[in-house]
Amino acid sequence: MRTKKALLNSITALILQLVTVICGLILPRMILSAFGSEINGALSSITQFLGYITLIEAGVGGVSRAALYKPLSNNDYTSVSGIIVATEKFFRKIAYIFILYSVIIAAVFPVITKNNLDWLFTFFLVLIIAISTFAQYFFGITYSVLIQADQRTYITNVIQIVTIILNTAISVVLIQLGLGVHLVKLVSASIFVLRPVIINIYVKRKYRINKKIPADDQAIRQRWNGLGHHIAFFIHNNTDIFVISVFLGLKWVSVYSVYFMICSGIKNVINAFISSAESAFGNMIARNENNNLNINFRIIETLTSVMVVLFFTTTGLLLLDFISIYTSGITDINYLILPFGILITVSESLQCIKTPYHSVVIAAGHFKQTQVGAYIEAGINVVFSVIAVLFLGITGVMIATVSATLFRIIDYVIYLRKNIISRSANVFIKRQIVNILNALSIIAICLIIPFSVPGDYFAWVLKALAVFSVAAVMTLIWNMIFYRKEIIQMISKIKNTLKKPKPQNNN
């Protein structure tokens, strides 16, 4: 049952990320064509600035999930209710704080970013974009945490798939009708408000949550320790755009957002397969199934390596060709920057490599023990970004992000080796050497093949299929040589999961 839930979560998460990538390519291009790079950059920058409110969460989402694994595995709904009441109380306070925070950001946004937009224009744009985030904190985020901890992430995935498609379709129609960006984003915010409302209704019908039970604040006592992990995640997703907005301007934010949209989309597709393992890891840890944990971690680690090399090597070889086609006709800034493209591809691939290690730490509830590493990661990113952007521009920002992520991966490897998954660090080192050699072999073969530069999407797709085929063959060869056992175990698990259960004999 646990494996089937994980598989269902992964399948729906994959569909969600594919939908997100496709819609994420359609809508920004429409916005670029209709409103220009500066407004596209403003939308990305505003979203990131509003995202800073997540610092106040102090990692409560991860801490609450970790606290819920054991009572959910024991069907202890009294404990579950206490944790939910405490978590909901916390997030509703954040929702009220967010209202004030949004007004402040709306007022100061034109001052702290380089832009030529009218003050009232950005003021109301910020408040409109803030609507859906407020609804998330007030109505849905607590119940989303419960659903994730219960390994039913497929529920929230389906809801997101529907709302993203609906938002994209309606937004495209509104833009084609010539309506302004404020009305387009207002309709978008209204659609995304549906998410937390539907989740709220589902949980009230599915789970026996008793809101009269006193809040179990003790269960989420590690929320301040979870802050370190939360800061690290926050820094990776927000520092880049903040530094670029302040030092380079909104047009450069638009350049960053186009590259990030593609590479983070690939990252999210990969994470769709591997991030759902967190709840399964949590269940194993709660039941003290250490052998199962080790076996499944090796399988997830192998799956991660296969997908990272396959997808990100392909992405790196095709990225600039795609950007050239995607931004054709946009002349207000140069979007083709090879060093930046390489570094952002590396950065997002490293985030995927980090995910299994992060998932085990969160599943085990080891927030306090690993918070120092999270603070150091955040510090490296901030300090290096501010310094590097002055000398190397947008490329310098990515060098800082890559450096911070590399540190955190090494920190996780050392911690897991000593405290959760006892094994030599050489296992990790060997795996990364194989990954690098695998990627280099793909790049070498593709550079030898005389590919022509694609001039349209059809030609690009043909080249992409050829590059992906080379990457798939080489990745299969490398992993069958060095990780045959894990590959066979992975295939076996999938087969067993897909088998229909035998009908029971009632005689």
Image: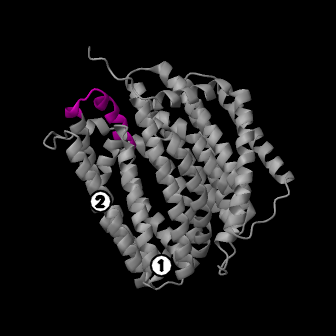
Which of the 4 image quarters holds residue 492? top right
Element under label 1? Answer: helix
Percent of width and height locating residue 10: 47, 42
Q: Which residues are magenta?
A: 62-79
Q: Amino acid at mark 1?
A: Pro
Is residue 54 visible to the viewer in this orientation of the structure? yes
Residue 42 left/right relative to 202 = right
* Closer-to-camera residue (247/295): 295
Marks 1/2 in contact by CB < 8 Å: the verdict is: no
**Label number found at residue 110:** 1
Q: Residue visible at 25% across and 52% down?
A: 200
Instruction: Measuring from the top left, give residue 42's x and y in whole percent.
Output: 51, 74
Is residue 415 highlighted in magenta?
no
Q: Residues within 10 Å of mark 1 (few under 14, many from 20)?
A: some
Q: How many marks?
A: 2
Residue at image coords 19%, 39%: 208
Q: Quadrant of the N terminus?
A: top left
Q: Which secondary structure dominates the residues rendered in magenta?
A: helix
Residue 95's disc number:
2
Tell me if residue 104 can be seen: no
11 relative to 427, above or below: below
Most foreground residue, 15 or 347: 15
